Image: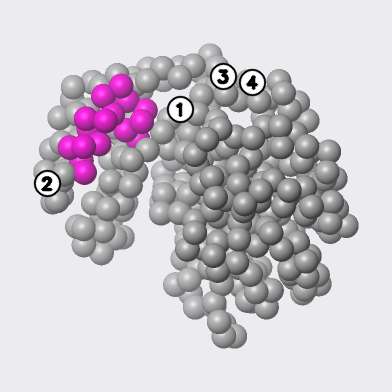
Amino acid sequence: MTPTICLAPLKGITDAIFRTTYAEFFEGIDWAITPFLTTVQGTRVKPHHLRQVLPENNRVMPVIPQIISKTASNFVLLAKALSDLGYSSVNWNLGCPYPMVARKGRGSGMLPNPDRVVAFLDRVLTAVKLRLSIKMRLGRFHVHEIETLLPRLNGYPIESIAIHPRTGVQMYSGRPDLESFEKCLALTRHPVIYNGDIVCPADYEGLKARFPQIKTWMIGRGVIIDPFLPSGIKWPSKDYSNPIQHFRAFHDRLFERYQAVLSGPSHLLDRMKGLWRYFSEGFESGREIRKQIHKSTRIDPYLDVVQRYFDGQPARIDRR
């Protein structure tokens, strides 16, 4: 059976322009969760707050908007605005590991407080008609947090639960805790989506063999590093005649689209440098190009560096 692959949300990376451009050049992603939208105070959501999820900006790749919030009333306000745009499903972020978020009790910072989580759901699910899914970690500090929380979620109509098998304080360090993830599967009645450290088809094959009940796989950094990865997982025999030129065309289209909407060269350079933080890991000489790009302070030198690099036909890392 062909797996379902979801593009994970990466703040500042997998925005509407990236998602659309990716879907025009590559195959294999079935749908995406957007980088989280923060809730707002007041009684209305301003249009600019919804720009990344406007239907006209998301015609190519199906998306589910993600909301990060610890306040049910603010969540409901934003969810209703998304419903007015035509969305039928929304995702709640209980996984963001960054300290500035978690310390405020949002993202993974809410996981040590299961009473607050279920109280939040009680209010939201009675006020909003959207389907609700959740993206979470094993806990903020310890895996006991998810082991306590998951059984309490079984009475709620949750569409799915995506689990990244690390705690929040781990950030992205260390290896995924697959033993704890396996325990989670026995604690929930909801469909579980696996998320974390799939960077090559062999990673997927190993996880699929261990967790055959998982039908949907969420991949974030692995897709940015290797945009060919989802098609490599789904159709191993598929071949791109010239992967470097294909990737180059993808890069150039991204650059053109960001140049058209970002205000000023510094914002454009920051966005491209953020992408190359991941792109560079897909090339054998990636460390060198990343250093050169990082030193670029103007657009023309950046374009010269990238052009020379691609003209040299750099070798991509074979991750099969």
Mark nearer the viewer, 1 or 3:
3
CA–CA distance between discs 1 and 4? 19 Å
Which region shows up in magenta?
279-294
Helix, strand or loop under label 1: loop
Q: Amino acid at mark 3?
A: Ala
For disc 2, the neighbor class at 10 Å (few under 14, some 14 to 19, many from 20) is few
Helix, strand or loop under label 4: helix
- Across and down, in percent, residue 114 comes to 75, 61
Q: Work out whether residue 82 can be spotted.
A: yes
Question: Which residue is the site of mark 1?
Answer: 228
Q: Amino acid at mark 1?
A: Phe
Question: Which residue is the site of mark 3?
Answer: 202
In the rendered structure, does residue 290 fall within the stretch colored magenta?
yes
CA–CA distance between discs 4 and 3? 6 Å
Mark nearer the viewer, 2 or 4:
4
Q: Main secondary structure of the magenta part?
A: helix
Asked if the residue under mark 3 is in contact with the one under mark 1, i.e. CB atoms within 8 Å, the reply is no
Vertical comparison of 222 with 240: above or below:
below
CA–CA distance between discs 3 and 2? 39 Å
Q: Which badge, 1 or 3, is on the more N-terminal residue?
A: 3
Helix, strand or loop under label 2: helix
**Label at residue 206:** 4
Q: Amino acid at mark 2?
A: Asp
**Label at residue 300:** 2
